[in-house]
Image (tube, rainbow, N blue to C red):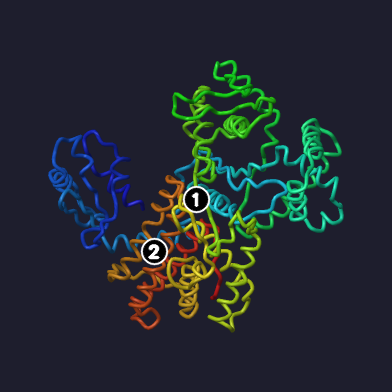
Amino acid sequence: MDYKKYIAERIKIDGVVSEEIYSAIAFPPNTEMGDYALPCFKFSKILRKSPALIAEGIKNSYDCDGVISEVSAVNGYVNFKINKQGLTREVICEIVEKGTSYGSSDIGKGKTICIDYSSVNIAKPFHIGHLSTTVIGGSLYKIYNFLGYKVVGINHLGDYGTQFGKLISAYKHWGNREEVQKGGIHAINSLYVRFNEEATPEMEQEAREYFRLIESGDKETNELFEWFKSMTLSYVQKIYEKLNIKFDSYAGERFYTDKMQPVVDELREKGLLKESEGAQIVDLEEYSMPPCLILRSDGASLYATRDLAAAIYRKNTYDFYKCLYVVAYQQNLHFKQVFKVLELMGKEWAKDLIHVAYGMVSLEDGAMSTRKGKVVWLEDVISKCVEKAYAVISEKNPDADNKEKIAETVGMGALIFGALYNNKIKDIVFSYDKVLSFEGETSVYVQYTCARAKSVLAKSGTEGSLPGNYEPNAEEYEVIKTLASFGEVVNEAGEKYEPSLVARYAVDLAQKFNKFYIECKILTAGEDEKNFRLALTKATLQTLENALKLLGIGVPEKM
């Protein structure tokens, strides 16, 4: 049950809708005051009353029932206490009944959400900077599916531009098909780097000609380009599999080649296109933004041109409820310009385009220093995470079976969780030792809690049951309340485009379960207590697994 919704729907405040009351309900800092609290300060101006009087009025008019056992008004807050026995039975029964779907909803039924994320560049390996867009987008994909939306994951490939002419020129001068095939994407990237270091003016001109040949459909140059593209996608697919990432579309920049001219024509017809120093722009000075460049002076398109075409295509194809762009905050201005241009074109759905900005990832040893010319490939970070996880597992449990498989699950989980745990807009300094710690706010801690719960259930040989009218103690009730809030947390994560809320919830639940585990005997408790605590252990395990799955993280059987 969504208790916030249950409470909000039973409160009537003149001039205030139920949704506004719902969003205002929070958890009080002291649980002895209540399980939920409604601050009344924001309603004071509407009702022309003091918050204390509003709170007192709500308390007096609220009928307690089998769900809400007590309502109090304190200093402008209305505090609500949930019926412990009723909440306990309902939560445990719901988790047992729903299992892997516990916390899900149908709030998104009949609505489509497009998510543009990862967006790899053809012929360039993944580096650590690609981690955030990939795992944030991947987690949002899973969260919205869980909330009942139809989700379309889009990998907007970077497969357009003169750099591909440069690559073909480099291959023609220095490449060898057998060596490139053997070296894969890193061999391709080395050719591109060499071009930028050694190219003559004649080669630069040659590169422009090769790009022209790609655009005009020349067979040989396009066959080379498609070969580079297939090697890139083969390479990134292996990384996506490790990160539990999937896409429904790989329509990249090149896909919109024939879809840009209609956009340019529409801009011109609506009087939005202006000439500036030979280039075609949309003037956004009125909106405190620099002009949005649509065509360069030589007639070439730009990122904005292709993004405008892509947004229109996606609306026409998917009729999305929302379209998210999971792209670093450095592109804030670009997306503000693109969204504003679409709005000026009369696209009412421009308001449904959302830039999900995120901070950058770096390593604590400074390996991402561009001044030193050093790039950290994501596959190397993955390998090191798994390698370090293997060392940790071997030290903690040297006799464990399938240590390689456990290390893969733990190492990948640590990498993903490390990028998702903090608010997405924050820059992250990635530390191997920190993310692989069995203590603190890490996926390893949560995974270990799951392994502990599995061990308890395995030793008991049963998953417990609910005794009649069981009254939970303080530690048990803290776990119950946290379990009850999972659906609300998932819903909030979707509303705020913030997977970190699910990651932090998993840590919070793990901490409360471990406190319960330490304070309360399970296997040696009395019959009623034992059965309930085993049921609580199973419910916690299921919920933690559900939360980690939404982040793209698995759970090993043992650790």
Find numbered disc 1 in the image and state the secondary structure of the residue it sits on. Answer: loop
Query: Crowdedness of circle 1 by 10 Å Cα count: few (<14), some, many (20+)?
Result: many
> Which numbered disc covers residue 508?
2
Query: Crowdedness of circle 2 by 10 Å Cα count: few (<14), some, many (20+)?
Result: some
Residue at the image point whose x is 46% and y is 77% from the top:
456
Q: Nearer the viewer, residue 213 or 552?
A: 213
Q: Is residue 285 left or right of residue 415?
A: left
In percent of width and height, residue 534 lies at 41, 73
Q: How many marks?
A: 2
Residue at the image point whose x is 75% and y is 41% from the top:
164
For residue 530, which quarter of the picture?
A: bottom left
Q: Nearer the viewer, residue 257 or 509?
A: 257
Amino acid bearing label 2: Asp
- In this figure, which residue is indicated by the disc labeled 1? 359
Label pair 2/1, CB-CB below 8 angstroms:
no
Q: Nearer the viewer, residue 206 or 179?
A: 206
Q: Is residue 105 visible?
A: no
Residue at the image point whose x is 52% and y is 43% from the top:
330
For residue 543, which quarter of the picture?
A: bottom left
44 vs 364: above or below: above
142 vs 396: above or below: above
Amino acid bearing label 1: Gly
112 vs 33: above or below: above
Q: Is residue 326 left or right of residue 518?
A: right
In percent of width and height, residue 19 lies at 32, 40
